[in-house]
Image (tube, rainbow, N blue to C red):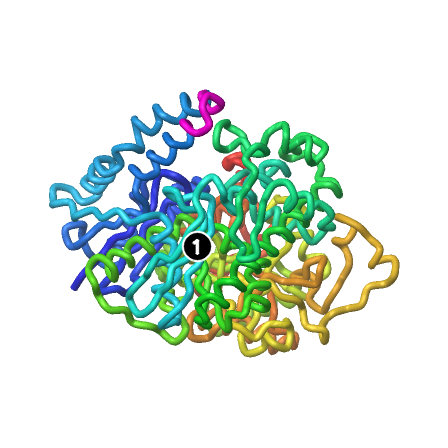
Amino acid sequence: MTYILGISAFYHDSAACLLKDGEIIAAAQEERFTRKKHDSGFPSHAIRYCLDEANVKMEDIAYVCFYDKPLLKFKRLIQTYLDFAPDGFRSFRKAIPLWVREKLFQKQNVIRALKEIGGQGPVPEILFSEHHLSHAASAFYPSPFEEAVVLTLDGVGEWATTSVMLGKGSKLTPEKDIHFPHSLGLLYSAFTYYLGFKVNSGEYKVMGLAPYGRPQYKDLILDHLVDVKEDGSFRMDMSYFGYCTGLKMTNAKFDELFGAPARKSETQITQREMDIAASLQAALEEILLKMTKNLYQTYKIPNLCLAGGVALNCVANGKILKESGFKDIWIQPAAGDAGGALGAAQAGYHLHLGHPRTVHTSDSMKGAYLGPVFSDEQIIERLKAQGAVFEAMSQSEMLDQTAKALADEKVIGWFNGRMEFGPRALGGRSIIGDARSSKMQSMLNLKIKYRESFRPFAPSVLREDMPDWFDLDHDSPYMLLVEQVSAAHKKPMSEEESGRFGIDKLNVARSDIPAVTHVDYSARIQSVHKNTNPLYHALISRFKELTGCPVIINTSFNIRGEPIVCTPEDAFRCFMGTQMDMLVLGNVILYKEKQDRNLVQDYRADFDLD
């Protein structure tokens, strides 16, 4: 029996994953335990959880696999400062002491931290994977494909920013890559910064903002910032960017090109920002389609796997599925750095140890439900300690009460089963509502999530009903594909409504499910499968029995700036700190009006805005 522990740490989204003879037993991000979003520290809590889940000790672990190679990354840092000297001296002076103190000698840091967790026992042998190999392994090995092209796109690993590998059986073979500083991930992050959002956190806001705008700056981006070849390879004009030499993503030349300095965070978003977001998204999609079309024509393999932070751009993913030529695609649900922990462990198991791979007909991620779970007994004990008023009932009664509350337009915190691995809530730690409600989108944004009004919400739909409601008949269990609402459920707009621009587009009911229909009639779809989440499937089925609609809203169970809830205590705190109507944990239900009002707390100041 072989246990392998995978770790990602020290940059952002630290995480741990545990394999048992190649099977994924547990995986979780450190942020869920420390309540610090995108926590970059050593994932001690996540590791302890993984060990506890498997009921093993550190001494039972054969190998610990780290997701990148710090010395290679340090070499890239030094080389970059030399290449751009003397412009980057301020950044160099700030970065190097941190590297020397904390990052350069990471093996010793990892050993020290593992000893704190494992006590006096021996520390397992530590293997270091390359960053993009970890990403590629996380995408290919859990996928349902015996053979696939594997494309990784992110900010930067050691040197690679874009890489292509071929997966077959248990082998992963590198084919080609693009190196730093030329990076689609950093291009998107540069615009994230310029539009006033937080880098490595707000990129999905740019994607959500894009449909409000017109892509009138697309040619400006492709003519000046990125030189794209017909095969999708690209080079960036670094004279517009500051991330190689400074502490900012863009510079004065970038400002001059777009006619103004970067928007300040939390200030009003104008039509200009919306148009820039739309232009960036259109440019990214054009590059990715050129790239993936060329990959299909080159290798003639029908399957594509995606990982890296850019793979979380579900709008682009939907275009790739439809237009690239690949017959099937599979995207790692924890596509960012957290998933590197999983990929490093799998690379260790299959590539270092040479073990064969088992291919599952769907995938081997278990629906991404890989985090902690709490029994009804544990939930009740913890709720009592919080002073909560609750009702425990049978599962059937709980489903009936919850479905009825959804149909009555109540906002519900849904805490059931194992916590999800990755950035999406998938019906384990979700806030749910009625997708048919015209007021639900704005209510959730302003009164529950405390976030920008323009941001869309995703639908959870029964997989068997999905083709009737959306122009998609492809599994999308991880909410990583965007597609249009089907014509049968669209509502035509009046001439006046069609002529609206920007945020004025928001309050128009475009379909029978307006709360999850974006302003361009699109939706970021989660297909709900009975075999991976039977309880969530049963809830939506009950809702369908009451309403005829198999679609509900699903958004992450947290407020803005807060990690998704992990424990019953986290869930109760969020419930009492927002205007949620009802909380369901296991087979236990809490109603807001029955709670002690002294337990209400506004805890928004506890978290930095994302």
- Residue 107: x percent and y percent? 23, 38
- Residue 588: x percent and y percent? 46, 62
Query: Which residues fall within the magenta stretch?
Result: 81-89
In the rendered image, the vertical position of residue 524 relative to residue 248, given as above or below: below
In the rendered image, the vertical position of residue 254 relative to residue 223, given as above or below: above
Q: Quadrant of residue 120?
A: top left
* Residue 596 visible here: no
435 drawn magenta: no
Asked if residue 335 lies left or right of residue 487, the reply is left
- The total of numbered circles placed on residues is 1
Report the quarter where the C terminus lies: top right
Q: In this orientation, which residue lies closer to the viewer: 367 or 533? A: 367
Specify the farthest residue to the left.
121
Residue position marked by numbered label 1 in the rendering: 152
Q: In this orientation, which residue lies closer to the viewer: 545 or 430? A: 430
Q: Residue at x 29, y 32 (%)?
A: 104
Task: Indicate the amino acid at tag 1.
Answer: Thr
Q: Residue at x 69, y 54 (%)?
A: 211
Report the quarter where the N terminus lies: bottom left
Q: Residue at x 39, y 71 (%)?
A: 144
Density class for disc 1 (Cα within 10 Å; few <14, some 14-19, many ≥20) is many
82 drawn magenta: yes
Q: Residue at x 49, y 57 (%)?
A: 425
- Mark 1 lies on a secondary structure that is strand
- Residue 384: x percent and y percent? 41, 51
* Residue 487 visible here: yes
In the rendered image, the vertical position of residue 448 relative to residue 603, given as above or below: below
Asked if residue 223 lies left or right of residue 531, the reply is right
Asked if residue 136 lies left or right of residue 259, the reply is left
Specify the farthest residue to the right.
495
Q: Quadrant of residue 490?
A: bottom right
- Residue 474: x percent and y percent? 53, 73
